[in-house]
Image (cartoon, grey):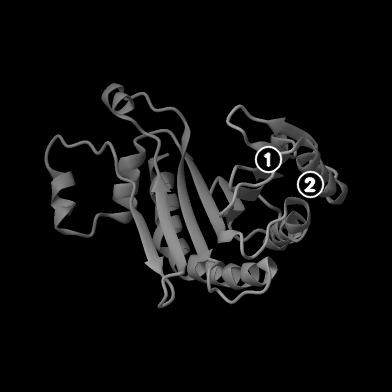
Amino acid sequence: MNPYSSLCDDFGFHLSLNTKLPLPTSRETILHFFEALQKIFPSLTDFECRDSGEFVLEENRERGSYRWVMLEQRRLCSGYANPPDLKTADDFHLQVLEIAPFHLDITRLDCEALDLLFTFDFVFSGNHDEVVVEALGLNSPLEGLVQLPGIRVINYEPSLMLALDESCRLQCRLGIETRTNAFQVRTGQFPELPISVFFTIRQYWTRSGFKTFAEAYQQQRGILQELVDNHIIPGVIRPLAQTIAAKQ
């Protein structure tokens, strides 16, 4: 069971392997890589080459819970939207990490950084930025500023990055993305759009000491869930969910 599915409207678990050199773009290499993935995950059926140059193979999005893999110029990404449980998502990401080096010639020398990311989306029709301020507060001398008569918040997207080791090569980042603009605030017409919370663990690869990508994944995965469960859920996710619920 996914422990986060009841806390938000949509939950995503993503992986990004960032490379120093451009990834292969030849027709044969790309197709062989995606065909190898498709043999393991036959439901990955929708292939697309986008105008911006990315190659994407994904499942049917209409199912609500779906997986995808994307190749950018210098980044390999995989994602699982609304996974049934975290182990299923782990198995998928680890399989991508196992296959990719053989088909795309990715080595430890070529790796820039490995990212693991949890995303939490809250669909809300209203001023997203006011909701974030109300839920999380400014907690600073500036808090009185937003309480002035006639004030309307039109942008508040707090972001925080922390180094988790002395070398600053293991980092975490918390980001909140709102989708309200000044026109919507002025007219009072708010479409149903998601407020997104992102929490990332990034390991820069140089001098990391890891022998395999899977080894790094497992270490980052434990840190990611520990920080999310102990800090992000009680400090960000639940306050946002409660504030939104009170306004609906």
Tell me the quarter of the picture where residue 100 sits: bottom right
Is disc 1 in contact with disc 2, using a CB cutoff of under 8 Å? no
Q: Looking at the image, is 169 positioned above or below residue 38? A: below
Q: x and y percent of residue 69 in the render?
A: 69, 45
Question: Which quadrant holds the C terminus?
Answer: top left
**Crowdedness of circle 1 by 10 Å Cα count: few (<14), some, many (20+)?**
few
Amino acid residing under circle 1: Gly
Mark nearest the camera among 1 and 2 is 2
Q: Looking at the image, is 112 positioned above or below residue 34? A: below
In this rendering, does residue 5 appear at all? no
Q: Which of pointers 1 and 2 lies earlier in the amino acid sequence?
A: 2
Check disc 1 and report the residue beneath it.
Answer: 64
For label 2, the SS is helix
- Residue nearest the observer in this picture, 75 or 147: 75
Name the outermost residue toward the right.
39
- Residue nearest the observer in this picture, 46 or 6: 46
Q: Residue at x 56, y 54 (%)?
A: 20
Q: x and y percent of residue 28 in the render?
A: 81, 39
Q: x and y percent of residue 137 in the render?
A: 27, 54
Q: Looking at the image, is 207 positioned above or below residue 55? A: below
Check disc 2 and report the residue beneath it.
Answer: 33
Name the outermost residue toward the top.
187
Q: Residue at x 55, y 56 (%)?
A: 117
Report how far apart the C-alphas of labels 1 and 2 lie in the structure: 25 Å
Amino acid residing under circle 2: Phe
Q: Residue at x 40, y 56 (%)?
A: 239
